[in-house]
Image: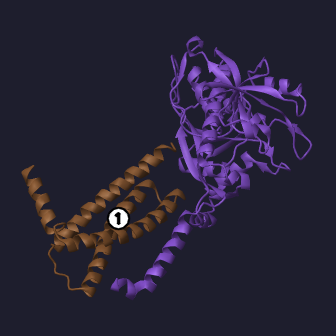
Chain colours: A purple, B brown
Amino acid sequence: MNWLKDHYKSVILYIFIYIVLMFFFTYPMPISINLPGGVNNAMEFVEFETSYSSSGSFNSSYVSVVTKPSPFQFFLAKFNNKADIYKMSEAESKIPIEEIIKKDKLYKDSSIDKALIAAYDAASKNLSYTENGLIIIDRILDTPAYEKLAVGDIIVKINDTEIINYESVSNVLSEIGCNEPFYLTILRDGKEITFDIEKKENDYGSCLLGIYIDYTYTYYIFDEENSNPKFQVIDSSGYGPSAGLIQTLSIYNMLTPIDITFGLKIAGTGTIDENGNVGIIGGIKQKVFGACKANVDVFFAPDFDYGANGEYNNYKDAIKARDIMKSDMIIVPVKTLDDAINYLMENYGQSN
Amino acid sequence: MDKVIKLIKTFYKYTYYSKIFRDMMNFTRILALFVISLIIAFSVNLYLSAFINETIFIIVVVISTILAYHISFRYVFKEYNHYRTVDIDFNIKTVFYYLFVEAVILSYVMIRVYLHIKSFYI
């Protein structure tokens, strides 16, 4: 107690400094930071009964995202020219991190399903599957769907109509009027639940349920046994849909006798749909930084203008990032799976 | 096995047997935990911002824990001596070995916790 009497001012000062520093190191800010990532081998996530080997490799590129960083991390990112800082909206900042991870996992699963369909089709192989509902990855804020549906729910019926995909939902909902109650049947954690819901008018005069095509994906059930060749997904780890194109190329390469890697280390990014169309992604700069560091030979980037005024383009941003790294990596613009395959065949196929 | 038991008994005799030592260790732990928590918070930030890699992060955790324990004990010992005549009935050299062991065990626990948390995000 004598010690405390003699040192109380120092103790108060040190406790104050401790609290300030811990705040600086731990307080979650409503922003997210994209940092350079790297590449992961994308050749080993699915196994086929019979498949062809590759001399090179397909690699998915990833970005490291820090969500709700501390003030100290924000400070470090400000001085890092390879980092991008994004402000989160008030609504986004309230979403628990577990929900963000769950959504990203669903996007990843959806990406693998679409990659299988697109690759089998491109390789003219038979993939047996059925469409069985619509999986909800996210809902539009302040809509009936946001209040009543959860991430991961599968819509299987609207009134008495079986739902198999987004188009069937859209067709049924177009027949239902605003504020007209209807029954929605979903699967949640394996259990079937039916409840009534209605479309409501928002502040912009649109009558919405709150489901948007990009926030959903078709619930496919694959019949691995009746597919030719038979397959098994052995590793669906990872998050997000941006490895779709590379996953598709990897599967395609395993299904066809011509090795389209031609000994190269190939990476890239871009979502894929069932028809082989590539889509835009986020964090292209950081993915290219990571790919350059990993000595990738060829990098595929989506070539679409997007943004309110079409001011952004993944391919152009990739070129700028590559130039910052002073790398020899070749960046290839693609809009479809065929663009990527044709590029490799035309530029490397001749010498083989 | 007998040697190990003898070592543990010697350890106990030259450390925890002493009440003064037990009191000082409690203050040491409190002070060390403040210091360790700050250093770890700082290094976690550096790690998440990709300024240091995982190996360096783990090394920082281990070294900072060991140093924090030793520096805290030295400070507590010095202050104890200032306020009362400390009749040392424990062995200082053995104490520093003990601090090293406790620091290493604590580092191991913290690294296991970190690896467990990390597994949820893979």
Observer able to see residue B78: yes
Residue sitting at the far front:
A1
Q: Quadrant of residue A323?
A: bottom right
* Residue B68 drawn above or below residue A6: above
Query: What residue is disc 1 on?
Result: B65
Q: Nearer the viewer, residue A153 or A222?
A: A153
Residue B103 image offset from top left, x and y in percent: 30, 62
- x and y percent of residue A225 in the render? 55, 13
Crowding at dot 1, Cα within 10 Å, few <14 / some 14-19 / many 20+, comes out as many
Give me the residue at 66% from left, 49% from top: A95
Nearer the observer, A331 or A173: A173
**Residue B75: where, in percent of width, then height?**
31, 79
Quarter-of-image position of residue B22: bottom left
Position of the N terminus of chain A, as image quadrant, is bottom left
Residue under the point 31% across and 66% down:
B66
- The subunit carrying tag 1 is B
Q: Looking at the image, is A232 positioned above or below residue A293?
A: above
- The amino acid pointed to by label 1 is Thr
